[in-house]
Amino acid sequence: MAMTMNTPGPTGKRHRLDRPELLAPAGNLEKLKFAVHYGADAVYIGGQKYGLRSGADNFSFEEMREGVEFAARYGAKVFVATNIYAHNEDIAGLEAYLRKLEEVGIAAIIAADPAIVETAQRVAPGLEVHLSTQQSVLNWRTVKFWKDEGLPRVVLARETSLEEIAEIKAHVDIEIEAFIHGAMCSSFSGRCVLSNHFTDRDSNRGGCCQSCRWKYDLYVDGDTVTGEDENQFTMGSKDLCMIRHIPELIEVGVDSFKIEGRMKSLHYVATVVNAYRQAIDSYFNDPAAYELKPEWLDEVNKAANRPLNTGFFFDTPGTEDHIYEAEDKAAPYDFAGVVQSYDETTGLAVIQQRNHFKPGQEIEFFGPGGTFFKQQVGEIRDVEGNVLDAARHPLQQIVLRTEQPVKPMDMMRKRIR
Amino acid sequence: MARKPELLVTAASLEELRRLAEAGADAFVIGESRYGARLPGEFGLEQLEQAVQYARSSERQVRIYAAVNNLMDNATSDTLPEYLSKLAAIGVDAIVFGDPSVLMAAREASPGVPLHWNAEMTSTSYAQADYWGRRGATRIVLARELNMEQIIEVKQRTTLEVQVQVHGMTNIYHSKRSLVDSYLGHLGKEPGGLDSSLGKGLYLTEEERQGERYPIYQDAHGTYMMSSDDICMLENLHELLEADIDSLRIEGLMKTPEYNETVVRAYRAAMDAYADNPSGYRFNPEWLNAIRRVQDPERELSYGFFYKEQVY
Ligand code: SF4
């Protein structure tokens, strides 16, 4: 993405003409489709090997092919995370795997291990290679190294501030991708082997068991630092959220806005992508008049698993940026269903059930571009027309009257608190 | 005189360096914390120069490697060319790096000075060794999370020198955050009211792992959590010697000079005995007993990951 600058805006900063890419995670094919439908310009997924989320569903080559075709209809791309640090025994099979990714139409791999970077360049030149955040790149000289190595894009370390990004952009003409939303390692990426030590699971090959979120007792020479009734020590971080700072990110020249979360739900991916898509588009429609809309923030909060913060973009995180209290994971809303079809003449929608719901509950519908309304669940029926007291069965087709028109792939969530 | 393999140690001061050289160390990795990660002591350029002068004049011709293995930010990376050219002028025997910015700067500023790739937990395969080799590194320092089989295979397949850690603690977590200060803030205490720097005796425990104490400390680059045990490969050192591993490292961080001297002597004795007569080599339990006598009873001597299978 070549960077183009034009006239300075009201803040004295320049507005970019090129829209940054909104890059979303997709743990499976369905999530990929929703991420794209809700406005992602690109999605990143994991294959069966070489990716760091060994717990995610992960794609077969067939699913990748289907995902690529689906994304292409929207003009979107699919990237594959091959971000492990390979051990000797992982090297055999790498060439064939990378060739296959190229063949099924993957646009880029996200790699950290230089052995994987170089192998991809050699055997699958049709794949772009993006340097993963697992390399913890913090400075322009290192970015320059990877550019000289032929990489078109570097994903910076999450520890890089906006100021540092500006400096990197000033020195090196390369695409910069930055995480803007989601959970974070509290360590430098790749520089944590807590899981290896605690559970014999290799974190740099996908075995991380989130030990940084465990609770620890802190001692000084045998005396505990923690008083009675005080929370224990932990390294667990709040989650990143930059929705309030879209103009700063655009103006500093971030080329790809990356959302974390290949393990996250369909509801999460659609909600978060939707909010960022609107914010980015709103900025480009009229940068001078750009304003943060409270509903974007509301939306993001409805999907949030943890309290949010701005990571390292403005300052090194401190006390307020870590979670010492017991984690309360529940968001106030829960995914309830997906719209399958809508009949304009009757006003009835067919909803695929994703979580229990029943008449009388408060629900919300939302779709791409910010369409949104609330209502109560009225009478519900199955497709045979039997009245139901609740939608109990996963994936069951439920007929329900919506107060406004809806479209296939619109989502329905219910209030749970 | 080139000795193979090399016994490599850290040192907190010039004095300790001399002492450990006399005890049998062949090489030292030292430096200053602005550029080098988790160093037991500061060696500014002046001290580094003194160390090099000592090394040159020492009877055993020890070698000095400069630790430049931090993850660099922009400001530090801007100073690299100057720093590296000074290291070259001083005459260090190698530059240890873990961030490609150092390689970029070294091409201009310190051509001819050997480069050792040490990214700690992410240096994991022969293919990676070869990659950095093609870009100018002469040595790969392997991740402590590899096992013996993997280490031996790397050595067989790469042309680079291979270094492994055989003794001492290891870093298991590095964050840029000041996590102890953050926690003190949560408790309503003054951040900095508790000195959490290296050697101040802070450690963590975890409920399911009673008896394990994980040292933790902070410096200008963030927070480090360290292993609760000390690797000790002395008893099985012959396996690494047979595999022709080029450099065996003793980590002296958070240990006294007495302790480090004892450890160096023990490994020196084992390595010399092996060199004298590889086929007749026998492990002498006295070597290990000497270490046991100075070992902190709270810290187990372990084989690290040398004989472990990990899953993921
Ligand atoms: S334990 Fe925490 S810091 Fe370590 S790899 Fe896992 S998520 Fe990252």
Image (cartoon, coloured by chain):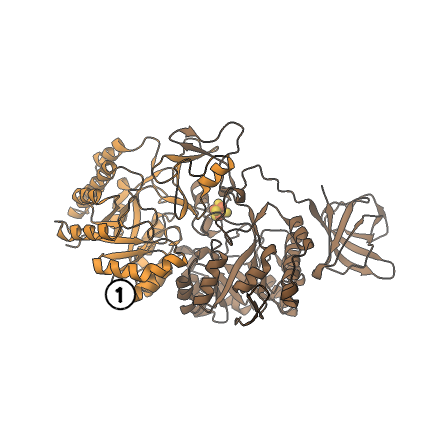
Chain colours: A brown, B orange
Q: What's the amino acid at mark 1?
A: Pro
Q: Check disc 1 and report its element: helix, strand or loop.
A: loop
Q: Is residue B236 left or right of residue B128?
A: left
Which residue appears farthest toward the right when viewing the image?
A: A345
Q: Is residue A194 left or right of residue A4?
A: left
Q: Is residue A125 left or right of residue B266?
A: right
Which residue is at the front of the view, A369 or B154?
A369
Instruction: Name which residue lies at 53% across and 61% down.
Output: A80
Residue B297 position in % (x across, y down): 32, 30
- Residue A78 makes an appearance in the image: yes
- Residue B159 makes an appearance in the image: no
Residue pointed to by mark 1: B111
Which residue is at the front of the view, B179 or A5?
A5
Residue B293 position in % (x across, y down): 25, 31
Relative to residue A72, is residue B42 depicted above or below? Answer: above
Which residue is at the front of the view, A186 or B14?
B14
Q: Residues within 10 Å of mark 1 (few under 14, many from 20)?
A: some
Q: Quadrant of the N terminus of chain B?
A: bottom left
Relative to residue B219, is residue A243 depicted above or below? Answer: below
Residue B159 position in % (x across, y down): 29, 61
Residue A391 position in % (x across, y down): 78, 46
